[in-house]
Image (tube, grey):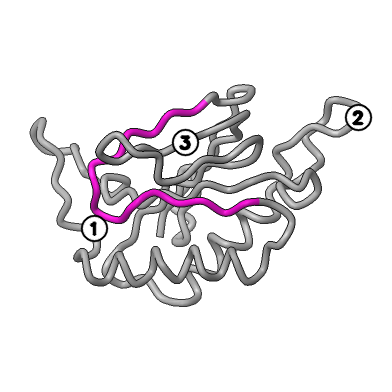
Amino acid sequence: MRAVVQRVSHCSVTVDGEISGKINAGLLVLLGVAPEDSQKDLDYIVDKVLNMRIFCDENDKMNLNVQDINGDIMAVSQFTLYGDVRKGRRPSFSTSASADVAKKWYEQFVETLRKTYHSGNIATGIFQADMKVELLNDGPVTILLDSEKLF
């Protein structure tokens, strides 16, 4: 499982001209799923998202996590995180999970966040939709996560 986590001042997702989700300050999490992902992978990503200290404290040091600031979280499915362009110029998505598998883990990710995080708003995009994601990256701060710890 992979995630791109961005610290945002605000974020919204629009599908077919309608806003499907909107948050204030917090995190945008783009989540990609691999075919072999398990509960262990999901738990790793959820723990990192909720506990990464990427928000500044009163001394302007990154010592606070999203829970400490009562921030919001926007979760968006993103199969292209497993896009491979090492050969040729068109990405191969052969290492991305099938839509059925990815949807199951994406929904489980959102459900787990909602069960374990009660301070802020949890918003989502729409799985497999053509989404327009608008955000104001704060910092900018962008962190890459991989449950296999490849980076």
Q: For mark 1, does the 10 Å Cα neighbourhood hold few (<14), some (14 to 19), or many (20 or more) residues?
A: many
The percent coordinates of residue 102 (x first, y second) are 30, 65
* Mark 3–mark 2 distance (CA, rounded to whole Å): 28 Å
Residue 80, by quadrant, is top left
Q: Helix or strand or loop: what does disc 2 sit on?
A: loop
What span is in magenta?
121-135
**In the image, is residue 10 above or below residue 82?**
above
What numbered label is drawn on residue 96?
1
The percent coordinates of residue 8 (x first, y second) are 59, 32
The percent coordinates of residue 70 (x first, y second) are 76, 48
Residue extending farthest to the front is 18
Q: For mark 3, does the 10 Å Cα neighbourhood hold few (<14), some (14 to 19), or many (20 or more) residues?
A: many
2 lies left or right of 53: left
The residue that label 3 is drawn on is 12
Q: Identify the residue at image location x=62%, y=29%.
A: 9
**In the image, is residue 111 above or below residue 133?**
below
The residue that label 2 is drawn on is 58
Magenta region includes residue 61: no
Three-letter amino acid code at the position of disc 1 = Ser
* Mark 3–mark 1 distance (CA, rounded to whole Å): 25 Å
Three-letter amino acid code at the position of disc 2 = Glu
Q: Nearer the viewer, mark 3 or mark 1?
A: 3
Q: State if disc 1 and disc 2 touch (CB < 8 Å).
A: no
* Mark 2–mark 1 distance (CA, rounded to whole Å): 41 Å
Q: Dividing the image into 4 quarters, which one contains the N terminus?
A: bottom left
Three-letter amino acid code at the position of disc 3 = Ser
